[in-house]
Structures are given as C-alpha cells and as structure tokens.
Amino acid sequence: MPSLANPTRFLDLVGRIVPWLALATAALFGVGLYLALYVAPPDYQQGETVRIMFIHVPAAWLAMFGYTLIAIASLGTLIWRHPLADVAAKTAVPIGATFTFIALVTGSLWGKPMWGTYWVWDARLTSVLVLFLLYLGLMALWQAIDEPGRAGRAAAILALVGAINVPIIKFSVDWWNTLHQPASVFRAGGSTIDPSLLTPLFVMAVAFTLLFVLLHLLAMRAEILRRRVRAMQQSQVEHATVAGA
Amino acid sequence: MKPALALLRRDISLAFREGGAIGTALGFYLMVVAITPLGLGPDLNLLSRIAPGILWVALLLAALLSADRIFHNDYEDGTLDVLATGPLPLPLVAAIKSLAHWITTGVPLALLAPVLGLLLNLPVETSPLLVLTMLVGTPAVSFIAAIGASLTLGLRRSGMLLALLVLPLYVPVLIFGVGSVSAAITGPASPWPPLLMLTAFSLASIVLAPLAAAAGLRNAMR
C-alpha cells in the first residue's frame, strides 16, 4: 500500500490495469448472462422469475461491499491519513448507492410476483433502505463542504457511525422473522440453492464485483485529475492576482 | 466535576433565557400532532392505533429543529475554541452539550406527549409507558443529533443537512419506542423487550456518540 500513496504511481497503475479489467468484466458478463438467461433452468416453484436473482443478489452484496469499503477507507482517512483514502471513500459513494438502488428495485420487482407486493417493511428491506439513505447522506455531506480535506474527514466520521448498519443488514434475516428469505448461499451446512442456479450466480457475482472495481478505479482516477485541475486553477488565479497587484 | 457542572448549568440557563427555542420545539410538536388527524380523517379507532407512531415521529422532527444549535452559537462566538483548549476533554464537552439539549428539548417534549396523546385518542392508561419510553429514548435522539450538529457546523443550510444525515440513524429509536407502546395498546406481546432494546441503544449512544461528535468538532475547528 505505501507505494500507492503516490497518486502519480497510482494513476500509472490504473492506466495499466483498466483495459484488462474492462475486458475481463465484459467477458464474465457475457458468460454469466448466457448461463443465467439460457442455461440455468427455471425454478420448480418460481419459474422464470428466479432469474431476477442473478441481478438482485450480486447487487445487494455489492451494496454492502461498497459501504464496507467506504468504512475501511474512512479509517484510512482518520487514522493513517492515507492520501488516497478519502478519494476512495468519496468515489465509492455514488457507485455503492447505485448498486443499493438496483438491489432495491430488482427486489421489489421480484417481490410482486412472489410475495404479492412490491414492498414490505420487514427487517431486511428496511435496513437496506436505511443503507440507501446513509449513502444519500454521505453524498449530501460531500456536496455541502467545499474544502475537500474537511469534507473527507466529516464524511469519514459519518460513514463510521453508519457502519453499524452493515452487520444489521447481514443478520437481519436471522434476528427477526422476515418475509425475506434467510441466508441461502453462505451458511453453515452448505448452500440451499441447487448447483444449476448457483454456478451462474457466482459467475454473475464475480462479474458484478469486477464491474464495481473497474468503475471505482475510473472514478478515483477522475477525482484525482479533478483535484489537480482545481489546484492548477487556484495557483493560476493566485499568480494573476499577484501580477495584477 | 466542577467545570462540567458549570458548563451544564450555563448551557441550560442559556437555552431557557434565550427564549423561543424550547417554545418553538413544543409549538412545532403540537402543530404536527394537531394537523395529522386532519389529514387522516377523524376515525378515533384508527388514530388510537397509530397514535404512538405519530407522537414519536413528530417528537423526532421537533427535537431536530433545535439540533443544529447544540454547538452553533459557541462555534460562532469562539467559546468552542476556549472549551477545546480548556481542562475538559472534548468528548466530555460534547456529552455535556448533548445532555443540555436533552434536558431542554427531549424532556419537555416527552412530558408534553401524553397531553397530545389525548388529541389522538391514545388510551390514557398507556400514558405513563409512553412518557417512560420517550424519556428513555430521547437521550439517544439528542446525543446522535450532536454528531450531525458537529459535522454540519458552520455550513450553509446546516439544519436541513443535519436532518438528512441523522434521521436514518433514528430508525432503531422509532422502531423500539413505537413497538413498546403499541404492544401495550394492542397486546398480547409484552411492552418490555422493545423498551429494554431502546434502553440499550440509548445507553450505547450516550457512550459512543460524544466520541464521534468530538471528532467532528475537531474537524470543524481546525
């Protein structure tokens, strides 16, 4: 990690990784969507609607992964003062919020045929909605503070306070009696999902994760460049003022 | 202990002598509770069933009205800098100011709630429990509001932003607070388990929130 503290070296690394990562993401999405939409059999109870799972579950995982990433980066901002930590935290917010939104929308579309309603106020749905609201709060805080250093530390504090929600989401289906099904992929005693559906799910999960990493690296690059442009403009203005005075 | 008590006394007397702040929160509380039945229609059975929820939601909003003032005046006139360099640790300063906010906002709102409950046909025999859950739950409201207040210190539209940041964190208070009173009204579940969860959440936020608020204050003052 220390070698990555230098933004120039980081940009260099991103430039080399991005083409391969983009290729791998596209290939995995190709394979994953083929497996999910053509190869996987319809569920014996849910029929074709089970295919919603291949979008919904990876998006929900990444919603939590995104927030966990922000929380860890926030520790990096507050404790280690890693210069890229607040760039990582800031750029992960809109991406994580988008995946949370996708999880909520696909879940709601899946809920209508299966549960008979688009929305119920059970513990899992409520805690994911709270996660979405926390993402929005982080975005608002980043927008409200002009000075990036102060904004980064304020957002880091808020992100760490909100991090308590992540374990609540994970265990909500075990602690409360929810309409949402309990954990079925990672559980003691093996998965309850048939391998014919589980394999496409894993391929899609890896594809979604690569997509997240790709988008995150690109957004971090854009943010670093944006800050450089801003710094250059500021120094230009200062020079102009000195010359004019 | 002496400086801590002095600070608490100062904050409380400032809140009372400043005038307006407490009255505004209470008036807002009354207003929200009074217009809700007009929007829902005067069905008394419906109102008594949802009364705990209305009273709790309105209380959260009323408490948030004054939340951005927890640190604001002291930040503007430089008192906060004096406090930060003084003998009290900054988390303790944040805790005392949160406590003062609870005494001047949370407690009056909680005590007004059973009166407003009459407007909503809340069964009178549940009033003691309602006040108890609110007295137990409002410390969490004030202490968490202090985190938001420290993060939004000196910003434009800080009040709106504060509500946006803090309201998601109030979800447990709302769920357990309303859960306890509703259980007492509709039965058969016992009102005590949600009340104990609410107590736990409140105690945890009293311990942890001042640390986050102090970090937010340091960030705002640097």
Image: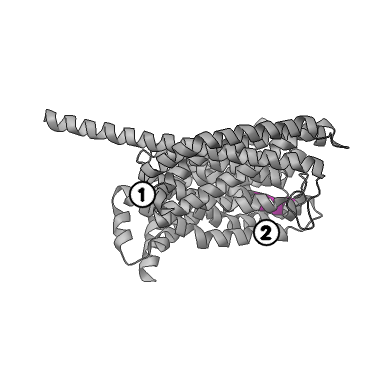
Q: Quadrant of residue A208?
A: top right
Q: The residue tagged with tag 2: helix, strand or loop?
A: helix
Residue B171 in view in this figure: yes
Chain part drawn in magenta? B175-182
Residue A20 relative to residue B218: left or right: right
Q: Is residue A110 magenta?
A: no
Q: Quadrant of residue A8?
A: top left
Q: Residue at x 74, y 37 (%)?
A: A53
- Residue with the most extreme left position: A245
Above or below: residue B73 compared with residue A225:
below
Q: Residue at x 69, y 33 (%)?
A: A31
Above or below: residue A51 compared with residue A8:
above
Q: Nearer the viewer, residue A65 or B199?
A: A65
Crowding at mark 2 (Cα within 10 Å: few <14, some 14-19, many 20+): many
Q: The residue tagged with tag 1: helix, strand or loop?
A: helix
Q: Which mark is residue B220?
A: 1
Above or below: residue B123 compared with residue A106:
below
Q: Which residue is mark 2?
A: B195
Q: Position of residue A230 (x, y in %)?
A: 32, 34
Residue A139 in view in this figure: no
Q: Position of residue B112 (x, y in %)?
A: 58, 50
Q: Position of residue A150 (x, y in %)?
A: 37, 46
Q: Amino acid at mark 2?
A: Leu
Above or below: residue B199 compared with residue B21:
below
Q: Quadrant of residue A226?
A: top left
- Residue with the most extreme right position: A44
User: Main structural element of the magenta stretch: helix, strand or loop?
Assistant: helix
